[in-house]
Amino acid sequence: MRHPSSCTEEATFLKCLFLSQEEETSGMVTGVILFGLFTTCVCASGVADVVLSCEFIGDSVRGQGDSGFTRSPATLILRDVSIASNDESLAALTPFVPPFQPDPSDLLFESKAPAWEIPNAELLLHADCNEQEVMCEITAYNPRGLKTESGTSYFMVSIDVKGVDFSAMLILHTLPVVADQMTVMQTALGLPMSHAGTLLTELSFLVFSTAKAPSGPLKADCLLSCGFKYLEASPDEEVRIEWRQQYRGTGQKIYTMKTKLNDSEGSTEVHNDRGESSMDAARVVGQGDTSLTLKNLKVSDVGAFICSVFLGHFHAQQVVNLQIFEPPIVSLSETKLVLKGGVAQTIRCHCSNYFPLDAQVEWLSRSPTDKEPTLFPDQGSLSSHRKHGNGTYTLSSRLSVPASVANGTEIICKVSHQALDAPLVVSLLVEHQEPAVLSCHSTADYWWVLCFLFVTVLFFYQLLK
């Protein structure tokens, strides 16, 4: 079977496959539906049908394993998702084509377009072309305190694209299907399927992040991205946002806000356990922006921050991983190195106030005849790491430079660290101090002085007698 060479070709190729398989068995059609890990199809200017290959995670049957869960192939079809209009690939793509003959064992979740945009949805459009891994998991969901209507089911979908800033958690609810003689029940879930063989759903609630792994230096300010969107809610409905930090097995609540969607006076309650952090209540209500600003970053801020949004019966969350990168300050113990008397001299390279821990120190040299530096034969010895009160580290490297090193040689200390775009380099020059040589003239002066001293001593000796 031929494989498509581009995302545009892939969508057209899949359509051709669907059309050519209409006379095949439903099992073959299922194979076409689940072809590849990810595909997108555009059906109109500025909107796209996004199709994701997912896993449905359900409760395991007793005796099938110890994990407590089963994983089954599933497909998520997001209809008419808004895409940036300047994307040139949209015109060549085609809409998603459902299977010709529905299969009751298929798990095809079809969701119609929400009234609001899914932020950064265009990243889903090109993830497969860019060879980015898309993680999509679907599970059954029980809304808090909600007595579901007969035939209505809820599902939670977690989507994450590795390598880019797209992460979202969606809550879907099923739509009613008018049953007739052609209606097929989905085997695993016992829900009616549409005539196209899909489970019709609608997006009820969305929590997302557009920056999953922010970073910054010490004392800087950082925005932890999080937001939510919803299908419908009462104007006086309360929304609660909770930010928690987890690091190395420990967790703590750092910020909580409760407010109402109509932002009535006095409705907002804030508990700030970190200090120097803030959230804009007006943006929470008006734009669904629950991003948290951390001011004056500290080493203790490193870790996973969990943004949880509670609205009515729904609750979803996002995880934002914050890292601190503080570059080292690099210096040498000497400004120049003078070798004399055939004795080796010691120099030190100091790397101070950096974070995280790992820093690499290399010694290089470049003689007057060399064009490029080379590794010094002896890489010296490292001191132990010293930790400062602000959580940063300091390290020193000690190098013994032998007297055999040529005059004018450049000794280089090269330091690499995660906070640096390129290694830092500091250097000094080697100088040789030649021993003094006595000339004939200086020898005569020496004996003259010695004779003068002898006569002076003899004079005072006679005088004292």
Image (cartoon, grey):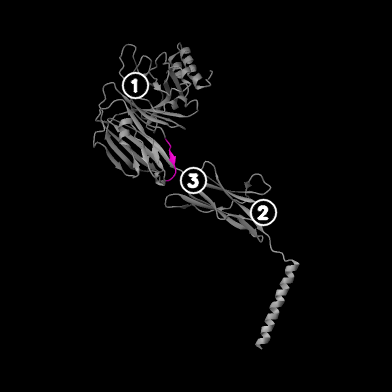
Which of the 4 image quarters holds residue 30?
top left
Magenta residue span? 212-218
Q: Which comes before the other along the chain, label 2 or label 1?
A: 1
Per the image, the residue denoted by label 2 is: 407
Residue type, numbered disc 3: Pro
**Residue 59 appears in the picture as rendered:** no
| Badge 2 element | loop
Per the image, the residue denoted by label 1 is: 201
Q: CA distance from mark 3 to mark 2?
A: 33 Å
Residue type, numbered disc 1: Thr
Residue 443 or 188: which is nearer the viewer? 443
Q: Is residue 376 above or below residue 150?
A: below
Q: Is residue 216 magenta?
A: yes
Between disc 2 and disc 1, the foreground one is 2
Say whether residue 396 is left or right of residue 271.
right
Residue type, numbered disc 2: Asn
Is the magenta region chiefly helix, strand or loop? loop
Q: Is residue 2 above or below residue 287?
A: above
Image position, residue 417 (x, y; %):
51, 44
| Badge 1 element | strand
Name the residue located 36 percent from the left edge and 14 percent from the top edge.
195
> What quarter of the picture does the C terminus occupy?
bottom right
Between disc 3 and disc 1, the foreground one is 3
Q: CA distance from mark 2 to mark 1?
A: 79 Å
Image position, residue 143 (x, y; %):
29, 29
Q: Which mark is residue 327?
A: 3
Residue 66 or 104: which is nearer the viewer? 104
Residue 250 or 231: which is nearer the viewer? 231
Q: Is residue 219 above or below residue 38?
A: below
